[in-house]
Image: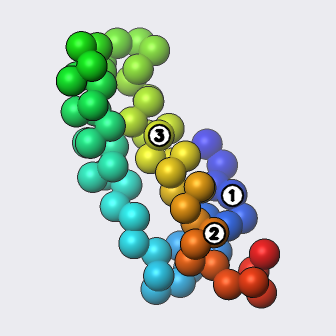
Amino acid sequence: MQKSDYVQILEKTDKYKMDDERVQKLVRELIIELGEDPTREGLRETPKRIASMYKEIFAGYEIGRAHV
């Protein structure tokens, strides 16, 4: 999975704060709470995909206009 330009820029700053591992664990817990098996073929990579999605969505909040 390729990181967006925004995420790459954000990771180089001191403002980058998202804890990918924690987000993935929380998504896994949500999958379990919904009655699904997180180890099932179609769901194995879902926590990673969701964490990546949120990182992409919220990356713009920490990047100044100069980087946009």
Image spot of residue 37 (x, y percent): 27, 14
The mark nearer the N terminus, 1 or 3, is 1
Residue 8 appears anywhere in the view: no
The mark nearer the N terminus, 2 or 3, is 3
> Type of residue at label 3?
Ile
Image spot of residue 5 (x, y percent): 72, 64
Q: Quadrant of residue 45?
A: top left
Name the quadrant of the C terminus.
bottom right
Residue 34 appears anywhere in the view: yes
From the viewer's perspective, tell me whether residue 6 is left or right of residue 48.
Answer: right
Q: Residue at x 56, y 77 (%)?
A: 62
From the viewer's perspective, tell me whether residue 17 is left or right of residue 9.
Answer: left
> Type of residue at label 2?
Gly
SS for callout 3: helix
In this rendering, the label closer to the viewer, 1 or 3: 3
Q: Are marks 2 and 3 in contact (CB under 8 Å)?
A: no
Q: Which residue is mark 2?
A: 60
Q: Quadrant of residue 9?
A: bottom right
Q: Residue at x 46, y 86 (%)?
A: 14
In this rendering, the label closer to the viewer, 2 or 1: 2
Tell me the crowding category of disc 1: few under 14, some 14 to 19, or many 20 or more residues within 10 angstroms, Cα based: few
The mark nearer the N terminus, 2 or 1, is 1
Image spot of residue 55 (x, y percent): 52, 57
Label number found at residue 50: 3
> Type of residue at label 1?
Ser
In this rendering, the label closer to the viewer, 2 or 3: 2
Q: Which residue is mark 1?
A: 4
Name the quadrant of the N terminus.
top right
Q: Distance of mark 2 from mark 3, alpha carbons?
A: 17 Å
